[in-house]
Amino acid sequence: MRPVYIKYKIRNLININKIVTIHYFEFDKNFHSIGESHDFWEFVYVDRGSAIATAGQKEERLKQGEYIFHKPNEFHTLSADGKVAPNIFIISFVSTSKAMNFFRNKKGMLPENLKHYVASIIEEGKLTFELPFNNPYLRELKLKENAPVGGQQIIKTCLEQLLIMLVRTGESGIEIKIFPSKESAENHLVTAIIDLLDKNIYNKISVSEICYTLNYSRAYLSAIFNKSCGYTIAEYGNLLKIAEAKKLIRERTYNFTQISDMLSFNNPHYFSRVFRRITGMSPSEYTESVKVD
């Protein structure tokens, strides 16, 4: 006699029906949007700096690491504060799931262990769609000809997981725990390396100093970092420095020589070479690309 199996029907808490836009903005310190409303959801996350968002009649100041949701048909605007040039991630999407009511008028700090979902959406979005640089008027996603297989679904599932984890965290009031493993231990070390690099953006810190601080060998830390991030530790340090340089350029307080000195590059020429290698533009070309019209 054949055993009888009961097929369990999975209940979807949140289903993303459509993705409308994906943006990663590097705004000028004086950026201000004219405002809009639309019949779909919008998630705004401040990756660096700070910003001011309005939702209906309410003004919200968002610090680095904070997010806000705009519900369908809610008029909203976004602007920089005139002092700090922010980096902002925005994704808009259609979802008719009842659980989305949790995000009405929702603002909060994105938990550290959920930020990788945002990073995955950004990276997969760049691979999958044609995303013009700093274009706030994007109205239609265009698929790349050489888009990787399954990219659209990865974006959808990453967003769904992010939303579900935010609902779970919000309802329980406790941080989501992950059981330790070899992989999570290595991820913790990678996070510690990035934290040291981030804290020393305005200083010089060598790989040897990082190894001494964390009490691990250079070979081991270099291997796990490269495996996790796809960069050497030194290359990643330069990525962080150039990201900070771009912010300083958009704030227009210092010239290129001063920025080079502040970020502890050997000289302005080396700073320009590294800047071009990472961004594909010279500092002057980048300045022109982010000017406010």
Image: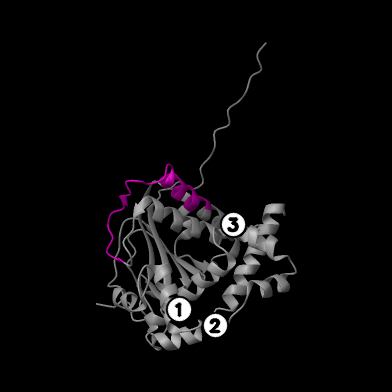
Is 149 colored magenta in this rendering? yes
The part of the chain drawn in magenta is: 135-161
Gap in angstroms between the C-alphas marked 2 and 1:
16 Å
**As displayed, is residue 270 above or below residue 181?**
below
Kindly indicate the quadrant of the structure image that contains residue 112: bottom right
Which residue is label 2 attached to? 202
* Amino acid, disc 1: Tyr
Marks 1 and 3 sit apart, C-alpha to C-alpha, by 27 Å
Magenta segment: does it hold 219? no
Compared with 181, 289 (above or below) is below
Q: On the image, numbered disc 1 is attached to which residue?
A: 270
Q: Provide residue 46's location: percent of width, then percent of height.
A: 46, 70
Instruction: Give neighbour class at mark 3: few <14, some 14-19, many 20+ (Cα, 10 Å).
Output: few
Q: Is residue 213 visible?
A: yes
Q: Position of residue 135 (x, y in %)?
A: 30, 65
Q: Which element is circle 3 on?
A: helix
- Any mark on residue 228, and which? 3
Q: Residue furthest right?
A: 215
Q: Amino acid at mark 2?
A: Tyr
Of the numbered discs 2 and 1, the one sitting upstream in the chain is 2
Q: Quadrant of residue 169?
A: bottom right
* Residue displayed at 72% across by 70% down: 214
- Judge from the rendering whether residue 168 lies leftward or rightward of residue 283; answer left or right: right
